[in-house]
Amino acid sequence: MSETSPATMPPANTAASRKVFIKTYGCQMNVYDSQRMGDALASGGYVATDAIEDADLVLLNTCHIREKAAEKIYSELGRIRRMKADRAEAGKDLTVAVAGCVAQAEGEEIIARAPVVDLVIGPQTYHRLPEALSRVAKGERVVETDYAVEDKFEHLPQASARQVRSRGVTAFLTVQEGCDKFCTFCVVPYTRGAEVSRPFAQIVAEAKSLAEAGVREVTLLGQNVNAWTGEDAAGRAVGLGGLLFALAEIPGLTRLRYTTSHPRDMDDELIAAHRDLGGLMPYLHLPVQSGSDKILKAMNRRHTAADYVALIERIRAARPDIALSGDFIVGFPGETDADFEDTMRLVETVGYASAFSFKYSARPGTPGAEMGGHVEESVKTERLARLQALLRDQQMAFAKGLVGETLSVLVEKPGRHPGQLVGRSPYLQPVVMPESVGEIGDVVEIEIADAVANSLIGRGTPATQSFGMVA
Ligand code: SAH
Ligand code: SF4
Ligand code: F3S
């Protein structure tokens, strides 16, 4: 991708000594966006730093999904305010920018509530970051939260091969943004806007350049990644399945994943990709949120628990070794004990290899927040504990079931202890291995000797006392 003018930093900010500290909250899409913003800033002369106290520019890439996530930002801004005051006393400056979903949702409110903030920039306008920073340099406080008509990805520079390599052998690639589903609990349709798919050719080109730089596994990202649509090189209309078939042809790209999917968008082409593509990892994150049809309806998920189970059966028929992951919300307004028991039953029926579960958090502006029948905090706490205990048992049983099997593992990095390497199983579990298995970037076959806390132990791994903490 060309480094077009909107991403070129104006002279006021090009001093090579300027350092940027980026802190990322929320989902993988924010991780990807932070990297792309980092790339844009690097091409404008900024150097990334891991130490906030060294930074000239602090960029918080924020998440609005639950109340706690949003409140974290304001406490972080409180700390930064004190830092900026100390700097000012020493005659030094600090620029503070808030990006991401809190920026989009709260815009001007952030400027009013946190005077330390110089710039608020929403996820659709990251390509305007350099220009916005130059306005800040002239003394303006800038709020940039319009839904831009131009394609931000076209205008953001891509990472150099060196930058890509420094991030390792796995990479994220956003293919789709936004959401038109409007689940009644969720802020994403408001913070990320309508569903937009990146063009096929742009995605293939980015995946190729990642592979050429040494990336072996790409995870395609989208708030509703399986709603991706496009036209392939022959002009044929394709969905995510078709895109995966094309990406599987790229030399060097040995593994593919995608996240997050909505059950309603799992079509036949995508299920066929799971059946036919060895490189598409047999691990699927398919959130269901609740096992109660009444609650699913109130959540506007537009499927029943039985639809979900039938879908899982179709996917398992196509790819019998597929492992499932999910998201669950407990305590949605109107959820009774019986509704919650339906969720427990669904979890038992499906059997998850991993999962994320949350207490419902009322988000301003969403229909859920206006509904009657809000559930007591203590009830939510109790339900979450029960659900998490069940999910933890399932996760451990799944991991223990792999002991004695030989898995293909992508070697990612050195372990925490000498003589170890760490990789990922097809099911996304960290695997600790002896360094004799191969090099970083190799896919190796290794027998699993044990399963502990959050990782698997490959046969022959030198013993240590803290295997559980490698992730
Ligand atoms: N697009 C994905 C989910 C994105 S948000 C999907 O459709 O499944 C990630 C997860 O956060 C959701 O799956 C949901 O479980 C949780 N979540 C979203 N809004 C929430 C809220 N208001 N309270 C609690 N959890 C929420
Ligand atoms: Fe949120 Fe629902 Fe869209 Fe997922 S599908 S991002 S939960 S509105
Ligand atoms: Fe959070 Fe926005 Fe992702 S609200 S989960 S950062 S899309």
Image: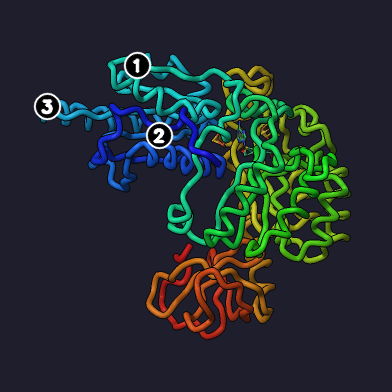
Query: Disc 3 residue type?
Result: Glu
For label 2, the SS is strand
User: Horizontal and vertical percent for residue 191?
Assistant: 58, 25
In this rendering, does residue 297 appear at all? yes
Q: Nearer the viewer, residue 13 or 19?
A: 13
> Viewed as shown, does residue 164 lie left or right of 362?
left
Display coloring: rainbow
Quadrant occupied by the N terminus = top right
Q: Nearer the viewer, residue 386 or 86?
A: 86
User: Horizontal and vertical percent for residue 97?
Assistant: 37, 28
Q: Which residue is drawn at 58% across and 69% down?
A: 410
Q: Nearer the viewer, residue 443 or 429?
A: 443
Q: Mark 1 points at which residue?
A: 141
Please, is residue 268 above or below residue 289 in the view? Answer: below
Please, is residue 336 above or below residue 285 in the view? Answer: above
- Residue 300 location, quadrant: top right
Q: Which mark is residue 89?
A: 3
Q: Which residue is drawn at 45% across and 83% down?
A: 462
Of label 3 and label 1, which has the lower sequence position?
A: 3
For label 3, the SS is helix
Label 3–label 1 contact, CB within 8 A: no
Q: Which residue is drawn at 34% across and 33% down?
A: 76
- Residue 255 location, quadrant: bottom right
Q: Does the residue labelled 3 lie within 8 Å of ligand 3?
A: no
- Residue 182 location, quadrant: top right
Q: How many marks?
A: 3
